[in-house]
Image (cartoon, rainbow, N blue to C red):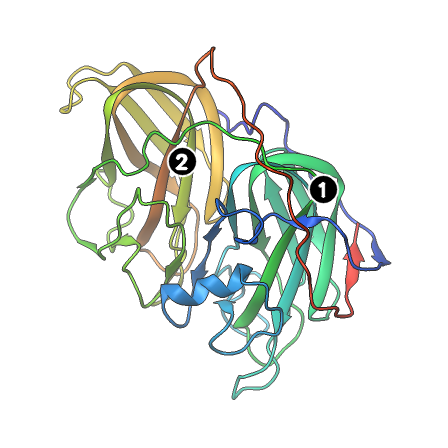
Amino acid sequence: MLRRRLGVAALVLTPLILPTALATAANVASPAVNPAARVAATTVTGTVAATDSLNDGSTAGSNSAAVFVVPTQIQGAQTRPGSRGFGYDLGGVATVESLDLFQYVGGSSRGARARLADVVVHTAAGDFAATLPDQDAVTITLPTPVATSWVTLETNTQHDGADPAIGIAELGVSASKGISPRRANVALGRPVTLLGTGWSGTGDLTDNVLAGATSDLSTSRVNAAGGATSLGLDIDLGASATVNGLGLAENDYGASGGRRLAQGVRLLFSDDPTFATVNGTRDLTLANIPYQQVDFDPAAGRYVRLTLLSRYSNRDESFGVTEVQLFAVPEPTAVALVLPALMLLRRTPRERTRVH
């Protein structure tokens, strides 16, 4: 079954680069503005706590206050993927207009870090390609505002630099309207049973923590035999639920480099914990990014099994997962509630370029 995002066909648009002033929209990735926002990223240095810097409002960055990613592995090897991106689960639906990216290039004994060049902004309403200028602060303006409950910035290439490990000091998500409630995540807090052997890490995969780290597996589970056909997990929802959306956050960087992310996955729905009887099967194709939400035709059951069918190529064979979300079909009588108006988040003025 082909991937669908809120019923909107995917878009790929090439932007122009224009100078601009600071945006006045609120940063819906900021906990001060939107407490429901969750970082979805894997830092290659430090612990999971380092990922808090992605939306803490500080744009300066340092070796201890940035999310470090390695998109291209080794200097000049632009075709060898490493880290696959970073972003947010916004916890609700926002009308996003632009992203404000601040990069940290200091602190390396090798010299200046290599800034991001070619990226793709992934949202529920489509994908937007952009080529960034070689500077620390950049605003990526979408061609038109999009309604989305998640955002991931896919990292594809980098500008020249002495160190491919680039620090992401801050990623703001600008929206001029409030945040609307989304479908309930019926997997939240529910027990997970891992399938297959060889799992490491201690992460709770339904605790609403989507951030991970290469050397800190307190929020993730990793399996060295990532290609095993039996690899997957079961979730007990506690009661039968009708589900039409999957959220998957993966730990995308291992000891050997970027991990091979899930490409094809299968969801089985059953009211039998042994899955002897299956109510429905949904085969999904995922994008090569570490966090995304994917819609599918509704299926019902108390127990949901997720198994890997195929994976994208990368240097590290292990499979790492940080969070699994299952979004339920809203009840017909559900009443949408609108959260209070967003505050404007003050930003430290810095020179940057807007990308349209």
- Note whether residue 222 is visible: yes
- Indicate left or right for 21 with 81 as reference: right
Q: Which is more foreground, mark 2 or mark 1?
A: 1
Percent x, y of residue 165: 52, 72
Most foreground residue, 222 or 33: 33
Name the residue rendered at 33%, 49% in the picture: 321
Residue 78 visible in rendering? no
* Residue at the extreme front: 340
Residue 167, disc: none
Horizontal relation, residue 273 to residue 139: left or right: left
- Asked which quadrant contains residue 234, the reply is top left
Q: Earlier in the sequence, mark 2 or mark 1?
A: 1
- Secondary structure at badge 1 equals loop
Give the residue at mark 1.
176
Q: Does residue 351 appear to the left or right of 88 in the view shown?
A: right
Viewer-proximal residue, 183 or 293? 183
Local packing at callout 1 (Cα closer than 10 Å; few below 14, some 14-19, many 20+) is: many
Identified at 43% across, 14% down, the residue is 331
Callout 2: SS: strand
Q: Amino acid at mark 1?
A: Ser
Q: Residue at x 55, y 73 (%)?
A: 164
Q: Quadrant of residue 13?
A: top right
Q: Residues within 10 Å of mark 2 (few under 14, many from 20)?
A: some
Give the residue pinned by disc 2.
Answer: 264
Where does the image place residue 114, in percent across and percent down from the top left?
62, 73
Relative depth, front residue between 93 and 322: 93
**Could you tell me if the residues under marks 2 and 1 are in contact, i.e. CB atoms within 8 Å?**
no
Please state the horizontal and vertical placement of residue 20, each as a whole percent of the image: 84, 58
* Amino acid of disc 2: Gly
